[in-house]
Image (spheres, coloured by chain):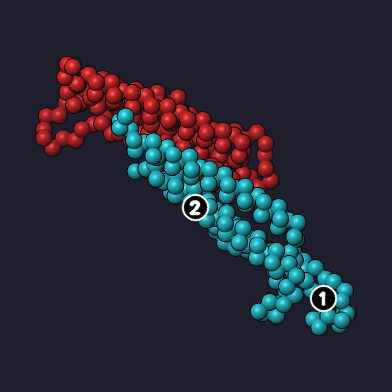
Chain colours: A cyan, B red
Amino acid sequence: MATNFSILDIAGSALTAQSQRMNVSASNMANANSVAGPNGEPYKAKQVIFEQQLQNQGVGGVQVQQVVESEAPARREYQPGHPLADDQGYVTLPNVDPVAEMVNMISAARSYQANVEVLNTSKELLMRTLSIGRS
Amino acid sequence: MIDKLSQSLQFHQQALSLRQQRQEVIANNIANADTPNFKARDINFSAELQRATSSLSGATQPTKTHAGHLQLGATNSVTAQLQYRTPTQSRLDGNTVDMDIERTQFLDNSLRYQADIQFLDDRISGLRKAMQPEQ
């Protein structure tokens, strides 16, 4: 049976998912200029994919299905003096779009706040429910 | 005596249970505000309450002729039918959650939940007063 506490689970799952999205966004922005990763390749922008959790009759929160790497073409910059430049003098930079990442970050933060609000309201209602008949 | 007491509280119980379910559905909508292809859902509250209360006061209450018989119609939980919300604006990712609607509905629902609890509280204190010995 569904209890009042499952609202906390739902909002909590959203908090987890949104903060993972923010982590990924932060990682993208931090690595916006990483020309070499551990595998020697330039960093690739990552995106999370959200998926609905299915529990009782379709109400069940959200989860991160997977983290995918962006397929966008890498940026190339002409820097002949760079140690990682190719024969033509171009350096391959990550395919991170800083503007899109900022927008993504703001959107994630707003969604996170909305879910915190849900949590606070639910907690208030729960406390109120626990005090039925005490007056 | 006891069944009369519980009967007088049953309506509020049904209403609270439905309100709580609706709260859960809306929390789920808010949690999935960024999930691609998620469709926002809601409960038609008045129809569901009518359905719940009509099944509750139904005249067809079977009589127990054996100690092993289970009580029918005394289930306290009602499961509401979920319906899809009609989207006002379409989004490219197929998601139909409108954050403004969801948040106002969440607020509305939580206020009405508190009102229900207030009614229940008053009812309980009224019953308690009726049970007090003469002062």
Would you name the residue on which mark 1 appears?
A91
Numbered badge on residue B3: none
Reply above or below: B42 against B135. Answer: below
Residue B75 visible, this orientation: yes
Reply above or below: B87 against B10. Answer: below
Three-letter amino acid code of the residue under disc 1: Val
Residue extending furthest toward the left: B66
Q: Secondary structure at mark 2?
A: helix
**Which corner quadrant holds the C terminus of chain B?**
top left
Q: Secondary structure at mark 1?
A: strand
Decide which of A7, B97 is in the foreground and name it. A7
| Residue B130 position in % (x across, y down) | 22, 19
Badge 1: chain ID: A
Residue for point 45% across, 28% down: B112
Reply above or below: B90 against A18. Answer: above
Would you name the residue on which mark 2 appears?
A13
Three-letter amino acid code of the residue under disc 2: Ser
Reply above or below: A27 against B91. Answer: below
Distance of label 1 from label 2 (alpha carbons): 41 Å
Residue B60 visible, this orientation: no
| Residue B45 position in % (x across, y down) | 46, 28
Relative to B123, is B30 on the left or the right? right
For label 2, the crowd category at 10 Å Cα-Cα, with few meaning under 14, some 14 to 19 and many 20 or more, is many
